[in-house]
Amino acid sequence: MKQIINFIFTIFFVLWFLFFLFQIIFESFGTFLHNELGVSWWLVQTIALVLVWVLIVEVYIKILIWRSVKNSLGDVLPVEADLWYKIDHQELERYTKELQSLGFIHLMDYTYTSPSFDGRVRLFSHPKEFCFAEVAQTKDIPMFCSMSCFLEQRWIVITSNYSAPASIYALNRRPRDLRTQKIETESAEVLMKSLLAFRQPMQANLNLEVIQETTAEFYFEQERQAQLQRQASVARKSLTWTLLEVLYFSFNPPLEWLGEYAKIKRQRAK
């Protein structure tokens, strides 16, 4: 109930502030445009609305989203699997056995200290293929598996059987994070084959080496760097454009994101 009240209060405040800004811009700046420059009133109103939109969306709301991204994870907190509540232990055990049969080693179980992250994660690494796997479940998301590997020059290849919402997809994309998405029922074996099949030609095309690290410390450092890059991306990117992307991805769910790699492939194909 408290969250609902806070949400209603926030919406009311934003609408009031929006009307207040419109009145100020329209009465001062708008009067000058109309009286001194002869600009029509409908154009003055349009300019005022655009300026208010920029102030609200591109400044105020962007700051809120930036802070949300900044505080979305917090620090890593190790946890015991036996203490996981509301977790599908049968599915967790199935994923664990399958990953271990593929050569993965269980590194640790953890969560994040941020109150906004209500979930648990089991982390694995592969000592021969130098890739990582996560089995995760949150309050609102059923258990899923994702795999990733890190290459030189901050290139990352990720595959997952989790279908991310359009808003997350639009905000979290980065030029050198290459992602492929499989259906939710795909096994860990299929994910690993997909990851390696994607990684090998990419290495050859870009002349990159896989970073041969398999420790949890290395993985979390990469996650920390990725988080900083997401913050920078949110700060740079137009939120209006992001909202249009969210709308587009809602109707056209993407199965892969090739980022900067797609541009390089097109240039070399010419």
Image (tube, rainbow, N blue to C red):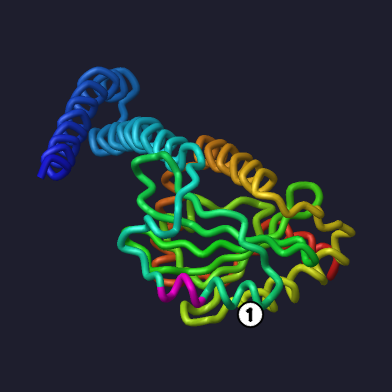
Label tally: 1
Q: Amino acid at mark 1?
A: Glu
Please name whichever residue, 65 or 97, is drawn nearer the observer in this view of the structure: 97
Q: Is residue 240 magenta?
A: no
At 26% across and 23% down in the image, what residue appears? 25
Query: From the viewer's perspective, is 109 left or right of 130?
Result: left
The picture places residue 165, in percent across and down from the top left corner, at 41, 62
Q: Is residue 239 left or right of residue 22?
A: right
41 or 95: nearer the viewer: 95
170 horizontally vs 211: left or right: left
When the figure is inspected, residue 269 is found, relative to residue 79, above or below; the finding is: below
Q: Residue furthest front?
A: 82
**Residue at 48% over, 42% down:** 77
Residue in the picture at 71% in, 72% down: 103
Percent of width and height locating residue 98: 59, 78
Query: For the N terminus, which image quadrant?
Result: top left
- Quarter where residue 263 is shown: bottom right
| Residue 38, x across and y down, in percent | 31, 26
Q: Nearer the viewer, residue 172 or 225?
A: 225
Magenta span: 90-94
